[in-house]
Image (cartoon, rainbow, N blue to C red):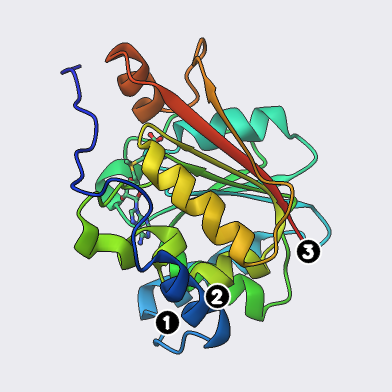
Amino acid sequence: MAESRLPRTSQHGPHRRLDETVVRHLRHPWRSPVRDYSRRAFDELAASMDSGSPLVLDSGCGTGASTAVLAAAHPECVVIGIDKSAERLARAPRLPGNARLVRAELSDIWRLLRESGRTLARHYLLYPNPWPKPGHLKRRWHGHPAFPELLALGGRLELRSNFELYVDEFARALMLAGVVDVKVVSFGADEPISPFERKYALSGHRLFQLTATVE
Ligand SMILES: C[S@@+](CC[C@H](N)C(=O)[O-])C[C@H]1O[C@@H](n2cnc3c(N)ncnc32)[C@H](O)[C@@H]1O
């Protein structure tokens, strides 16, 4: 696997418009229409799920390798890997019976889950696209209008990234939303949970993990 480079940004710290962007999104519900393909995927998922099982989301699961690991680690839960890339999902490994993979847009699924009244036991965001240019703030999940939908699902949240600025901004956005127990650590990935974690660890990148309980 080719060595990967750390995301490069011209930002010297959290984006100067981070706070106002997050606060605006927290105050104003996002009204963009849900895509048809996401709605169909959600309906199929909902029909296949036992409504009593605790839910774990692996948002942006890529090939679903991490979904398989998480499903094995949480056999009492239904673990749902979501990604918009059909090409990545086609490379899924063999999955435990409590895992599902769904091709959909994350912001749509978060909203549909919230509208259906479901909440999460755990929510993983493993190596989300960094969007390092300052003009890309609203594409980072904490700067996206769907951030309140992510928060509404609750649960134990875990974000991992090799882009420290992303993690710091995400922590700040959680604080603005009133989440208090946010913890950020740098860690060594002895047993990588996902292909991107493996790639970044092999490239010698520092990896960061944010955890928080969202209520
Ligand atoms: C950098 S990859 C990380 C994949 C995997 N989590 C890993 O650690 O190996 C980011 C993934 O997020 C997915 N993704 C990005 N934006 C998305 C969106 N809006 N909806 C669904 N998936 C998205 C991409 O297709 C890609 O597979």
In the image: residue 7, left or right of residue 158: left
Outermost residue on the right side: it is: 52
Q: Can residue 94 be seen by looking at this rendering?
A: no
Q: Please indicate whether residue 56 sits to the left or right of residue 187 in the image.
A: right
Give the secondary structure at mark 1. loop
First in residue order: circle 1 vs circle 3: 1
Determine whether the residue tagged by mark 3 lies in a helix, strand or loop: loop
Look at label 3 and name its amino acid.
Answer: Ser
Measure the alpha-carbon separation of dots 1 and 3: 22 Å
Q: Earlier in the sequence, mark 2 or mark 3?
A: 3
Q: Which residue is mark 2?
A: 111
Residue 147 x, y percent position in the rendering: 51, 68
* Contact flag, marks 2 and 1 (Cβ < 8 Å): yes
Which quarter of the image is occupied by the C terminus? bottom right
**Residue at the spot 37% in from the left edge and 31% down from the top edge:** 162
- Between the residue at mark 2 and the residue at mark 3, the CA separation in whole angstroms equals 17 Å
Identify the residue at image location x=47%, y=84%. 30
Relative image position of residue 28 (x, y in whole percent): 52, 88
Residue beneath disc 3: 51
Q: Is mark 1 within 8 Å of ligand 1?
A: no
Q: Left or right of 169: which side holds 174? A: right
- Quadrant (top left/top right/bottom left/bottom right) for the N terminus: top left
The three-letter code of the residue at mark 2 reads Arg
The residue that disc 1 covers is 34
